[in-house]
Image: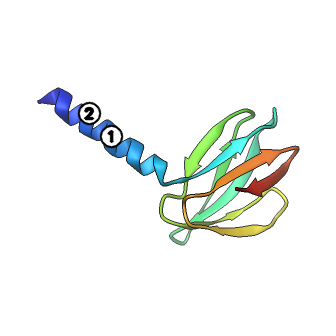
Amino acid sequence: MLRTLVATTVLLAAGVSAHAASAVNLDSEPRTLIVTEGGSKSELVVGGGETADFCAAGCFVTLPNGDIEALTGSETIEIKGGVARIK
């Protein structure tokens, strides 16, 4: 019973992250994105060489250069040389 519950929880968690936007930082230094989701702003710091999932149901993100983009939750933001590109 416990194994079934744990397996179900893991599958649900994987399903949620599969539909979230992600930010990939290809630089060696951390980069910060400002995420506005549901009227709430937060800073998302993505460390050098790291990937972060966020924005499962749509949001606005302020990129390192100050541009604001609307995301649906299926995009990937790639940061390289301090420049962010949405794929």
Percent of width and height locating residue 13? 37, 43
Query: Which residue is found at the position 60% from the left and 43% from the top?
Result: 52
Which amino acid does the dot numbered 1 rest on?
Leu
> What is the spatial separation of the Cα atoms under label 1 and label 2, in whole angstroms?
6 Å
Query: Which residue is found at the position 85% from the left and 60% from the top?
Result: 65
Q: Within the image, what quadrant is residue 47 found in?
A: top right
The kind of secondary structure element at disc 2 is: helix
Name the residue furthest left: 1
Q: Is residue 54 left or right of residue 69?
A: left
* Quadrant of the snapshot with the C terminus: bottom right
Which amino acid does the dot numbered 2 rest on?
Ala
What mark, if any, has residue 11 been given in the picture? Answer: 1
- Could you classify mark 1 by the number of other residues whose Cα lies within 10 Å: few (under 14), some (14-19), or many (20 or more)? few
Relative to 41, residue 3 above or below: above
Percent of width and height locating residue 44? 65, 50
Q: Within the image, what quadrant is residue 42 found in?
A: bottom right
Percent of width and height locating residue 69? 70, 68
CB of mark 1 within 8 Å of CB of mark 2? Answer: yes
Q: Nearer the viewer, residue 15 or 44?
A: 15
What mark, if any, has residue 19 been given in the picture? Answer: none
Query: Which residue is found at the position 48% from the left and 64% from the top?
Result: 57
Q: Is residue 44 left or right of residue 12?
A: right
- Could you classify mark 2 by the number of other residues whose Cα lies within 10 Å: few (under 14), some (14-19), or many (20 or more)? few
Name the residue furthest top: 3
Name the residue furthest right: 81
Percent of width and height locating residue 32? 73, 49
* Quadrant of the snapshot with the N terminus: top left
Quickly name the residue at label 2: 7
Colour mapping: rainbow
Query: Which residue is found at the position 78% from the left and 47% from the top?
Result: 79
